[in-house]
Amino acid sequence: MTGEVVTLGDELNWLENNPLFGKGVVITRPRAQAGGFASLLQAAGARVIHFPTIEIIPPASFADLDRAIEMLESYHWIIFTSANGVRFFFKRLKERGRDIRGLKGIRICAVGPATAALIEARGIKVDLVPKSYLSEGIAAAFQGMDMSGKKILLPRAELARDVVPEALSGLGAQVAPIVVYRTVSTAGKRAEIAGPIAEGKVDVITFTSPSTVKGFLSIWGEDEPLPKGIRIACLGSVTGAAARKAGLRVDIMQEVFTIEALVEGMAAYFVGEGVLD
């Protein structure tokens, strides 16, 4: 029993010494996709505050995707730029009576390890994971390849940037950007987050995509300032740029495009190692 108490005490001491211990961290991504993020924060002793500002929904029409699925075998590459793109693509593939056998001979590119893991969990080999987990990284990864005449399927969000299709088209590829999901603001109420903020329970608000920034401000109010003591943490330079453009001060920005890295970045900030922009 004594040993168990000592072990528990050591664990509590570790938590209390963790730079995120007791910090109130707001997660703005959809609750259904926030589990891993929340677990990491809670393991570091943080208080997680769920405030989803966006939700992921199907496209207005699946017509374009259905046509692409019918001619799936004609594509040389499929490029997945997000985990949501993977989920919606394969869900529709199944609904159309197709399965992964239709992908035989098609090379697969995934942006980042999390997206790659979702694909590989379906028994599909991922041929390319760019070093940079952004659209620019995908474009750079194909430089030097012979893409002339290659047909590329690009399942993506409705308002995705055109960095990838423009870069690959410039290499001579035939790119088919297909909308497989949409990101929309939630019907969240300002009072749901205004209360914890007023009570001093919020230390950090995290943004993992430009759409979470837009969604948050649509609820909070674009012209309403946040208390000075609240830090803003962004995942990736594109998200950081969106936050700054919206008038937010970005205190913590993690270029390594993983949730684990974002948590590490927040911890580093609170021990004085983070860089204040």
Image (tube, helix red, strand yellow):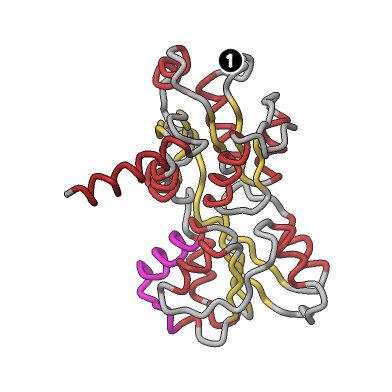
**163 and 273: which is toward the camera:** 273
Residue 103 place in picture, x, y as percent: 50, 81
How many neighbours does mark 1 have within 10 angstroms: few (below 14), some (14-19), or many (20 or more)?
A: few
Q: What residue is drawn where x is 41% and y is 31%?
A: 49
Q: Is residue 69 above or below residue 160?
A: below
In the visual, does 13 lie left or right of 142? Answer: left
Is residue 57 at least partly visible in the picture?
no
Q: Is residue 143 above or below residue 23?
A: below
In the visual, does 100 lie left or right of 213? Answer: left
What span is in magenta? Answer: 86-101
Q: Quadrant of the C terminus?
A: top right
Residue 44 place in picture, x, y as percent: 44, 42
View extreme (front): residue: 2
In the image, is residue 219 part of the stretch drawn in magenta? no
Q: Amino acid at mark 1?
A: Pro
Q: Which residue is mark 1?
A: 227
Residue 233 place in picture, x, y as percent: 60, 36
Is residue 89 at least partly visible in the picture?
yes
View extreme (bottom): residue: 105
| Majority secondary structure in the magenta region | helix
Q: Secondary structure at mark 1?
A: loop
